Amino acid sequence: MKHFKPLKLSKNLQAQLPYVDKPKTLATAKLDLKKQRVAVVRDGHEEQVASLMKMIRTTYKEKKRKDRKDMRVRVRQHKKDIQTEVRAKYKRDQQKKKAVMRKRSKMSSTK
C-alpha cells in the first residue's frame, strides 16, 4: 500500500470547490496540538504514587468482578427458591381445589 503526500490546493481553487469537497483543516489542527504537548517525566515519588494508584485500581476492579460473580450466583439461587415456592403454592392450590370439588360433588349427590 502506497502512502501519498496530501494533495495541496491553492486557496483560489479551494474557494471555487463546493463545501463537501473542500479540504478539512481539522486533522492538521489535532496534529499541531500533539506536537505542542510537553513530555512529562515523573520523579521517584510520583512513580510510587502512580504505581500505588494502579494497584488500588486493580484490586478495586477485581473486587468488583468478584462481587458481580457472587451476585450472579445469589440471583440464580434466589430464582430457584422462588420457583420451588411457586410450585409448592400451585400444588397447595390444586389440593384445595380438589377438596372443594370433592365436597361439592358429595353435596350435590346427597340432594
Image (tube, rainbow, N blue to C red):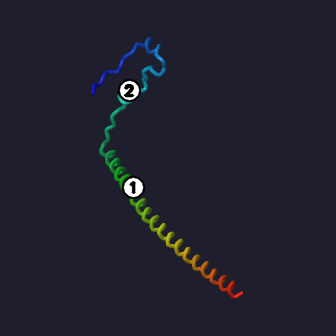
At horizontal 44% and vertical 62% (from top left) the residue drawn is: 71
Q: Quadrant of residue 103?
A: bottom right
Front in this rendered view, residue 27 or 83 = 83
Residue 32: mark? 2
Q: Amino acid at mark 2?
A: Asp
How many discs appear?
A: 2
Q: Is residue 60 above or below residue 94?
A: above
> Residue 2: horizontal and vertical position, in percent?
27, 25
In front here: 32 or 46? 32
Q: Nearer the viewer, residue 68 or 54?
A: 68
Quarter of the image that includes the N terminus: top left
Earlier along the polypeptide chain: callout 2 or callout 1? 2
| Residue occupying image coordinates x 66% and y 86% | 106
Q: Position of residue 75 (x, y in %)?
A: 46, 64
Q: Depth check: 70 or 45 in front?
A: 70
Mark 2 vs mark 1, CA separation in Å: 37 Å
**Residue 65 as seen in the image, left or right of residue 84:** left
Instruction: Assess disc 2: are there few (<14), some (14-19) or many (≥20) residues with their C-alpha within 10 Å of its C-alpha.
Output: few
Q: Which mark is residue 60?
A: 1
Q: What residue is drawn where x is 47% and y is 22%?
A: 20
Q: Is residue 55 above or below residue 86?
A: above
Mark 1: amino acid = Tyr
Task: Assign the C terminus to one quadrant of the image.
Answer: bottom right
Image location (x, y in percent) of residue 48 = 32, 48
